[in-house]
């Protein structure tokens, strides 16, 4: 028994020391990327021993928080313009910005068969509420307004639009039935090649500007090696497989 304890004690001490030296990185993540990020963060922690502390929300408010000194070290935005703006303002690690995914927009209803595969339900205009994310704060909301404009439906549906603060809230409006349908990120309703529930129309990319999503290491992550390690991991094949499985392009 004493010999066994002699073996276990150094092992336990080594595990405790390893845990004590494990690092972490604070990451601001666009709400549309919540599910992929949760999977990638779990893989990252398992593969490296380091932890991702993620906060999820709309890109616009994250920009304001970063400008005001929020402790984020890496930013995964829902567009490419916000990280570029932070870069021009000297609030990032030079050379760290890259496009980690290109998103797709979907018109979705929690009801099966409600949304047809050509989006004709929009033109019929027989719904009461249409959910979108705030176009001033969330790039997917902006893409939704661009699609409506291209379809010539902006005025027709204007009185029926309900805005979520971010894409997660817009999706919740639809999921709870407070809106019959809404524009969401495809990644919120898609996994491994299929829609996970309800009915949806994947909005053609020609109806809106490309939703290029950039990541960047922020100034506060400059001296944290885990920030660079995580960004490299995000560029790797394991993360790429996760990202693709949620309907994003790379």
Image (cartoon, helix red, strand yellow):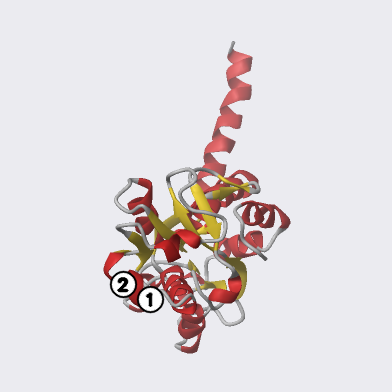
Residue ranking furthest to the bottom: 88
Q: What is the number of the mark on residue 158?
A: 2
The answer to whether residue 224 is seen in the rendering is yes
- Mark 1 crowd level (few <14, some 14–19, many ≥20, 10 Å Cα): some
In depth, the one of 240 and 1 nearer the eye is 240
Say whether residue 62 is left or right of residue 10: left
In depth, the one of 157 and 223 nearer the eye is 157
Say whether residue 237 is left or right of residue 86: right
Q: Residue at x 42, y 46 (%)?
A: 110
Compared to residue 57, the image places residue 155 above or below, namely below
**SS for tag 2?**
helix
Disc 1 vs disc 2: Cβ atoms closer than 8 Å?
yes
**SS for tag 1?**
helix
Compared to residue 108, the image places residue 111 above or below, namely above
Where residue 111 sits: x, y (%)?
43, 44
Where residue 114 sits: x, y (%)?
45, 49
Residue ranking furthest to the left: 159
Where residue 146 sits: x, y (%)?
46, 77
| Quadrant of the rendering where the N terminus is positioned | top right
Say whether residue 10 is left or right of residue 221: right
Give how far apart the Cα atoms at labels 1 and 2 are: 6 Å
The total number of labels drawn is 2
- Mark 2 crowd level (few <14, some 14–19, many ≥20, 10 Å Cα): few
Say whether residue 213 is left or right of residue 181: right
Residue under numbered circle 1: 154
Q: Residue at x 37, y 74 (%)?
A: 135
Where residue 179 sits: x, y (%)?
32, 54
Residue ranking furthest to the right: 237
Residue 122: name its quadrant: bottom left
């Amino acid at each position: 028994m004493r010999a066994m304890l002699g073996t276990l004690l150094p092992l336990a001490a080594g595990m405790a020391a390893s845990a004590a030296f494990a690092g972490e990185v604070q990451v601001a993540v666009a709400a549309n990327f919540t599910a992929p990020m949760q999977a990638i963060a779990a893989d990252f922690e398992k593969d490296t021993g380091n932890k991702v502390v993620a906060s999820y929300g709309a890109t616009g408010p994250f920009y304001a928080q970063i400008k005001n000194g929020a402790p984020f070290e890496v930013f995964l935005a829902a567009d490419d313009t916000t990280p570029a703006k932070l870069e021009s303002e000297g609030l990032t690690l030079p050379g760290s910005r890259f496009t980690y995914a290109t998103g797709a927009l979907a018109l979705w209803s929690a009801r099966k068969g409600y949304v047809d595969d050509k989006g004709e339900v929009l033109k019929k205009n027989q719904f009461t509420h249409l959910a979108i994310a705030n176009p001033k704060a969330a790039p997917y909301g902006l893409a939704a307004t661009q699609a409506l404009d291209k379809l010539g439906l902006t005025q027709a549906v204007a009185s029926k639009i309900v805005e979520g603060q971010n894409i997660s809230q817009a999706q919740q409006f639809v999921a709870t039935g407070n809106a019959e349908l809404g524009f969401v990120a495809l990644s919120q309703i898609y996994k491994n090649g299929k829609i996970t529930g309800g009915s949806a129309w994947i909005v053609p990319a020609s109806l809106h500007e490309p939703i290029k999503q950039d990541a960047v290491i922020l100034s506060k992550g400059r001296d944290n090696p885990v920030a660079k390690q995580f960004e490299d991991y995000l560029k790797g094949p394991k993360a790429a497989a996760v990202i693709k499985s949620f309907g994003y392009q790379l």
